[in-house]
Amino acid sequence: MIKEIDIGELNKRIELNLSRLENDNYYRIEGLWAPAEYDWPGDKEGRALLSFMSHYKISGKQTECMPLMLEQMPSRTNKYLYFGPVAGDVIFEQQLSGHSWLLRGLCEHYEQFSDDFSLNALKSIAKHLYLPTMGKYSSYPVEREQIDVGGVSGSEIGTIDGWKLSSDVGCAFMSIDGLSHVYKITADEEVKSLLDEMIAAYLAIDKVRLRVQTHCTLTAARGMMRMYNITKNNYYLDGAKSIYELYVYGKGMTYTYQNLNWWGRPDTWTEPCAIVDSLMLAIELYKATGEEKYRKTGARIYRNGFSTAQRQNGGAGTDTLVCEGSPWNYLAPLMYEAFFCCTMRLSEGLWYIYENKVLLYTETEGKVVKDENGVYSDGDVVYAQVDQELEPYAEDFTETDGLRLVPIVKYYRVPKEIMEKTKQRIIFK
């Protein structure tokens, strides 16, 4: 049996997310600009612009904040139109990462409006922030003490070999995404040379041993897919495939099709930003290859991984990890909302799902069975045993092995006070 995607549900998710952005001062012009001391220069502003553009592409309507943001941006940035310090001898990893989102937002804006400001800004940021890093990526520090640090929002952890590093290990390579979009627009061969250097360096890194962040890895792979779509060079496609295989089969993905925030740290949390990336990567690989395994993974991520990522207020938050080595056998919220990153990034995920909804159907067999990991599912749909307070929000019920089971309950339907005190048991051993 094939279960088509519920368009009414998707539209509700989109409506809730847009309402969150339009009605909280954090995303309005009066609260949009991050303070000067914020250690992720350009990150908030870039995610916000990309979020606004994602909703524009769905509805054709601009948020009130978006034109004001672009109008005020020159007065908030340095002379090269980027945030934070002017590039120097030390490469600031979090500044590169944050500005990848700003490049994405500017590129999306230019593609829709063909405006001079967006084009000039994306060119200037690429030239003055990124190109000076040419020749440095092979020196990215991979031989370092392995320490389990970092919150939902990463932080600076020190300087090694000319790199000011982040607890979001590898986040400098997030920029493959933003720079590939710049190359798509400008066809600048210097940008392509930088991209090729970054991609070669990142593919060579042992991501599991270094315990890199899965989000930045999946984002980098999406940039590789964009380069493949531009050039049709299989080198980029093969790189993206290798990251997909590592993520899906190398313990980067949970039993519920969510992500470990870092490889090798199953006691941490999921991150909706990475869940978005994983779905987009899977579907882009399907479009490029026609291989059904990619489409099926993308559909399972949407049906299961997205179920608990979005909250009733329209934002997105982090959950427990349900995977090998995890201290949890259940799904439950850890942070109600990562409003500073995931809520905004969810918008691009919702736009992408809206654009590709015909591919995101799930298939069921009409029988719920337990696999070798102790997880019950019916085809593509994962089942859980939920606390009584969650039952009114469940879609279906089944009796299996003496258990009362339901498909993973979608948190966007559940009031906060109920969501925060209940659990969804996934693993039965």
Image (tube, rainbow, N blue to C red):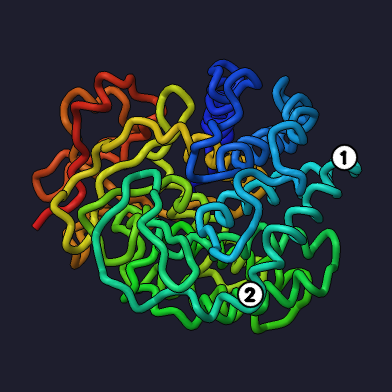
Label 2 close to label 1 by CB (< 8 Å): no
| Residue appearing at x 91%, y 43% in the figure | 116
* Residue neighbourhood size for the residue with mark 1, other residues' Cα within 10 Å, grouped as few (<14), some (14–19), many (≥20): few
Residue extending furthest toward the front: 89
Q: Viewed as shown, does residue 409 lie left or right of 373?
A: right
Indicate the position of residue 73 as horizontal and vertical percent values.
74, 34
Which tag is nearer the camera, tag 2 or tag 1?
1
User: Does residue 365 appear in this view?
Assistant: no
Give the secondary structure at mark 2: helix
Indicate the position of residue 366 as horizontal and vertical percent values.
34, 51
User: Does residue 321 appear in this view?
Assistant: yes
Give the secondary structure at mark 1: helix
Indicate the position of residue 95 as horizontal and vertical percent values.
56, 52
Q: What residue type is labelled 1?
A: Phe
Q: Quadrant of the C terminus?
A: bottom left
Q: Mark 1 points at which residue?
A: 113
Q: Nearer the viewer, residue 363 or 286?
A: 286
| Residue appearing at x 62%, y 61% in the figure | 88
Question: Counting residues from the N terminus, which is met first, the one under dot 2 or under dot 1?
Answer: 1
| Residue appearing at x 22%, y 63% in the figure | 371
